[in-house]
Image: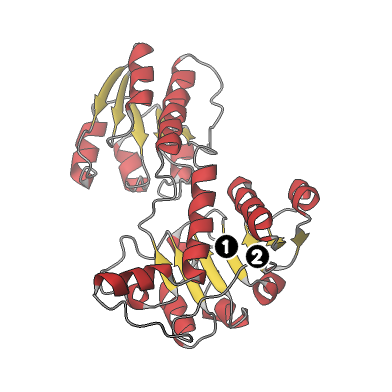
Amino acid sequence: MKVLVSLNIPTLGIDMLRKAGLEVTVWTSDKPMSKEQLMEATQKHDILLSTSSYKIDSAFLDSNKHLKLISQFAAGYDNIDLKKAAELGIPVANTPNAMVNATADIAFALMLAVSRKMFFMHKKISADDWGPFRPQAHLGVELKHKTVGIFGMGRIGTEFAKRCAGAYDMKIIYHNRNRNKEAEEALNATYLSFDELLKQSDVLSVHCALTEETENIFNYDAFHKMKPNSIFINTARGRIHNEAHLIKALQDKNIWGAGLDVTNPEPMEADNPLLQMENVAITPHIGSATIEARNEMSRLAALNIIQFVLGEPIKNKVV
C-alpha cells in the first residue's frame, strides 16, 4: 500500500505509517501542492492523507477512482464531495476531537480580545500612537455575568462554554440540532430557538459544522436580531457567516464587535475593512495550531489508515 501525505504534517503519524510497513510519500513543503501536482501524485498512490487545503471534488474523485481511502487531517470535511466518494466506494475518515481544547481556547481568547479591543490597541503602539491617558477613549466591556450563546453545542462548544462559566460565571444558552442534556445538566445550559439565541446572547460563539443548512446562516437579518452590544465569534467555518453582511452589521452598529478565526473567503484580503475596526479581532485559522492538537491530528489520521489496512473498523469513518 502506498500512502500520499499531501502536506507537511507532524512526523508522529508518518512514523506510525512506516512502522506499519506502508510506503509513504510526504509532501515536505509548507505550501500545499497545486491542483495539478496533487492530481499527478495521487495517481501513483493507494491512499490519500489529505487536508482541508485541498478541494477533493467530484472531478478529482472521478480521476482517482483507484483510491482505497481518504484520511482527512482535520475534523471538518466540507472540502470533500462525500456523496461522490460514497458513490465510488472510497471511504473517508477524519480526525475529530483532536483540536477540541485548542479551538475552545481560541474562541475564548478572541472573545477577550474583542471585549477589550486588544488587537486595535496593540496596533496603536506599533504605529507610535500610545497617546495620553483618556478616561473615555477606546473603552471595552466586561464579561462577568453576561449571557453567552453557543451555536452548536458539541464538544468544542461545550468546552468553550465551560471556560465562560468557570472564568466569568456567564449564563449559558445554546441552539443545536439536538438537545444536549449533558451540557444542560453540567452547565445549567438552556436550549433556545435560533431566533431567541440571537436575541438573548451578549456573546454568540459559532461551533457548528458547515452544511447546506448552516452556510450563510449568520447574515444581515441574523445580525439585525442580535443585541447592539453583542459580540459575534466564529471559529468553525468562514462560510457560516456572510462577511459582507457582518461588515455592514458592525458599521451600522447592529452588533458591537466580532472575533474571527475563520473568514469568508480564506485567506482574507489585506485591505478587508474588518482588519481596521477597533472592535474586531481576527486570527488566520489557527484554532488547531498547538503542538498537542496537531500531533493528535497526525496520530488519528495515521490510525485511520492503519485500521483500514489491517481490515479493522475505522473508528473515525465519515462515509
Q: Residue placed farthest to the front in the image?
A: 133
The spot of residue 16 in percent (x, y) is 38, 18
Identify residue type, mark 2.
Answer: Val
In x, y percent, where is residue 281?
42, 67
Q: What's the residue at 66%, 51% (across, down)? A: 162
Label 2 CA crowd tier, 10 Å (few <14, some 14–19, many 20+): many
Q: Residue at x 38, y 68 (%)?
A: 119
At 33% across and 77% down in the image, what residue appears? 276
Q: How many marks?
A: 2
Dot placed on the residue nearer the N-terminal end, 2 or 1: 2
| Tag 2 secondary structure | strand
> From what the image shows, is residue 153 above or below residue 213?
above
Q: Which mark is residue 148?
A: 2
Q: Nearer the viewer, mark 2 or mark 1?
A: 2
Residue to which mark 1 is pinned: 205
Mark 2–mark 1 contact, CB under 8 Å?
Answer: yes
Regarding residue 65, the answer to whether it shows in the image is no
Q: Is residue 71 left or right of residue 143?
A: left
Q: How far apart are the two marked residues, 2 and 1, measured between alpha carbons? A: 7 Å
